[in-house]
Amino acid sequence: MTQKLYYSSAYIREWSTEITNTVEREDGIYIALEESAFYPEGGGQPSDYGWIGNAKVLGVQSEKGQLLHQVDQLPAGGDVNCRLDWHRRFDHMQHHSAQHLLSAVCLQELSASTLSFHLGQDYCTIDIERSQLSQQELRDLELAVQQEIYENHSIKSYWVSLEQAEALPVVKPPAVTGDIRIVEIEGIEYNPCGGTHVSATGEIGMIKLLKCEKQKGHTRIYFKSGYRALQEFNQSADILAKLSVRFHAPKEEMMNRVAKWEQEQRQLLVQVQALKAENDAYLGERLLAQRDGGVVHSSFADRSLKDLQSLALRMIQQEDVVIVLKSDPDLKVLIAHRGDQHPGCGAYVKQQLHSGAKGGGSDSMAQASFTTAEDANVFYKAAVKAFASLTRQDAAEQA
């Protein structure tokens, strides 16, 4: 049985103890300690990281009251000095306490109970018993929970019996029947919980509600708190400052400037599309004039597959020919005709593709995709040769 120091204080960062057991498993080395402040994964909270002597702690699990610490190597000696990754631990403390407070305010302001909690590396979420939440309700909720942070309610934990827990206004029934650990936010809530928490709501710093979305008939709220919330604000401010410089507008006028830029882009797009259509018409006529019998073929260093599809459709409408075009940037080959020739474009592509290449399509248009320029070029040349031979045969038969 490991003595769990985080129950006496979540703020213990360093301590000395001795190794009591070593276990080697398929996924690594685990050691047990006489005393440990490393919190194990559980209750929605990830495990702590840190160091045991010269060994790095990669994770912590709880098995039958004993904490097993996964390490990258065996520490030297039986007596060891231990140290938490305090940045990670305090981040977990801030977010776990933030979840308790946010859930309590959701219950108070929205009459919505919390169904689940996720403390992730990138963001945290709670799912609440509410079918939807408007943006105004989300903003009001954020202000309400921030007010409770400013009130700096004390947060304390203690153990009670099941009978004592039943006499408290706990937010949910205890999941255990023995001694129960209660985390109390003064004047806010009593919550059965085994996690690590800050000592007062003021240490949460702030809670930023990022967004909400529907999740299986309920609402999921994404949030960050503490240093993560500050980092989120700094990143957003940095992006806004860079946009302000790029658009030559202060942040107060940014939305108007972006709207004007979007309008200008739409006008330019119309002009570009008109010019592109005009250029495709000229290019199509030139390629048709240079066709090799019944096959029009060309390789392009600056055109995408989408561009070539538009060009091929234009030429097919003008002449009954086979089109074989290659896009060097996309490493793709396009084959197209009116669909009444044999073989169909899709059938040819599927028959000729080798391992590693992909493709397919309809009788009238198909594409082949490659991982190297050499493979694309080999397929392109073979397709030109094959369809040129077929069109010559058709022409000879008709003659």
Image (spheres, rainbow, N blue to C red):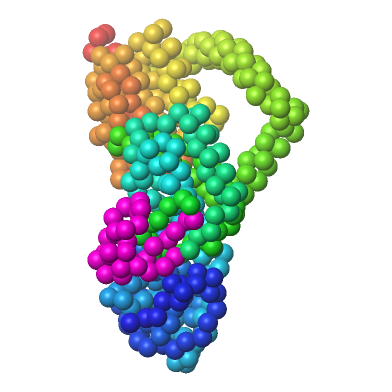
Residue 373 drawn at (x, y percent) = 46, 41
Side of 252 relative to 350 (left or right): right
Seen from the viewer's position, the closer of residues 190 and 164 is: 164
Residue plotted at (33% across, 22% down): 365
Q: Is residue 32 above or below residue 299?
A: below
Count of numbered circles in the view: 0
Residue 236 on the magenta span: no
Residue 318 drawn at (x, y percent) = 41, 7
Seen from the viewer's position, the closer of residues 80 and 315 is: 80
Q: Quadrant of the N terminus?
A: bottom left
Residue plotted at (67% across, 36% down): 240
Q: Which residues are magenta?
A: 157-186
Res. 366 visible in picture: yes
Side of 335 relative to 178 (left or right): right
Residue 176 on the magenta span: yes
Seen from the viewer's position, the closer of residues 279 and 75 is: 75
Q: Quadrant of the C terminus?
A: top left
Residue plotted at (28% across, 16% down): 339
Residue plotted at (31% across, 13% down): 338
Residue 85 drawn at (x, y percent) = 54, 69
Residue 191 drawn at (x, y percent) = 38, 56
